[in-house]
Image (cartoon, helix red, strand yellow):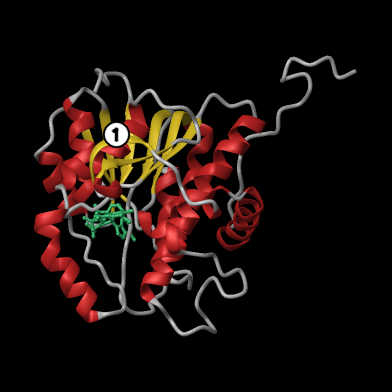
Amino acid sequence: MPDQTGRTIIVTGGGSGIGRAAAAALSAKGARVVLAVRDQDKGRAAAATMDGEVDVRPLDLASLASIRRFAAGIDGSFSVLINNAGTMTDELRRTADGFELQFGTNHLGHFALTNLLLNRITERVVTVSSTAHRSARIDFDDPQWERRKYRPFGAYGQSKLANLLFSFELQRRLIAAGSPVIAASAHPGWAATGFRITSGSRLLDALAAACTPALAHGPEGGSLPTLLAAVGDVPGGSFIGPSRFGGIRGPAAVTEPSAEAKNPDLARRLWELSERLTGTRFPLPAMTDQTAGGTGA
Ligand SMILES: NC(=O)c1ccc[n+]([C@@H]2O[C@H](COP(=O)([O-])OP(=O)(O)OC[C@H]3O[C@@H](n4cnc5c(N)ncnc54)[C@H](OP(=O)(O)O)[C@@H]3O)[C@@H](O)[C@H]2O)c1
């Protein structure tokens, strides 16, 4: 990684797992890092292990009020927002605003946070997804699991597909606004972190836990796609993941998302739904003929 002196980078969930590993690598290269965490003690303990300037700020992505407070507390502009935090749960739970917890935290929380901060971001927005997006779909009739039987892994997959649809739509909107900021996304493959797979089947979960030490890489390996997406030489709209063992681990490289994730109609629909639910909007004005350098004729 090249020297990062002069950059300020916000990492959600930077107090543990992949977020912590990414934050540590960035601060070791000179970036000023802001750990956006719900557990301040954990955040401070993580910060104490890192080099350089590391700030710890409270952020609970399962609360729109907390997200608004966090955004209001960020002074001036900064370089990169890394939407890393994520949750996986085995039972139907809801955020403070009544959203299904995984959709609410993983997607809606980051959607709101990005819209509230976008005016002050100068370089990139990176969103961490998962290979679980591949088997997922967005159920627009019941996105919050109010009428369907709850499927934990289905809800996780929906939130991770939403992460990608959001990132690609954000890139389209940034281009349309003539912004120099780019949106990129990443997935860590399989990383041994605080994350426990909750597929809905106890047998599968136990099997996954037993295989993790042998098959998964550590948080540092899992952070490589995020780091490439955040500060590497990649174009806007890139999706980065591990390049070996079917995308489970190995060096980070540009990879292909599912066809569903690239569907612009789906992305627009999700964006509109997310705006209604969070009360936040894409904040940049559309480019006019004049700002685009056209004649307007
Ligand atoms: N590990 C994998 O194999 C894997 C695979 C695919 C995708 N991912 C994705 O990678 C990202 C990082 O996960 P990880 O593996 O590093 O897991 P992790 O060790 O459990 O880290 C998740 C982080 O998210 C934070 N978080 C959860 N809910 C939050 C909330 N409401 N507000 C603020 N922060 C919250 C956690 O905070 P606390 O420390 O307070 O719990 C933690 O710092 C997630 O987006 C996950 O979906 C991981």
| Spot occupied by residue 203 in the image (x, y as percentages of width and height) | 20, 79
What residue is shown at x 72% (from left), y 20% (from top)? 291
Ligand 1 neighbours mark 1 (CB distance < 8 Å): no
Residue 200 placement: quadrant: bottom left
Q: Quadrant of the C terminus?
A: top right
**Observer-nearest of 105 and 129:** 129
- Quadrant observed for ligand 1 in the rendered image: bottom left
Out of 47 and 132, give the one closest to the viewer: 132
Residue 51 appears in the picture as rendered = yes
16 shown above or below 159: above
Q: Residue at x 56, y 70 (%)?
A: 139
- Quick check: 293 above or below 102? above
User: Dot 1: few (<14), some (14–19), or many (≥20) neighbours within 10 Å?
Assistant: many
Q: Which residue is mark 1?
A: 227
Please provide percent x and percent y for residue 110: 44, 51
Quadrant assignment, res 78? top left
Q: Whole-percent x and y of residue 109?
A: 44, 56
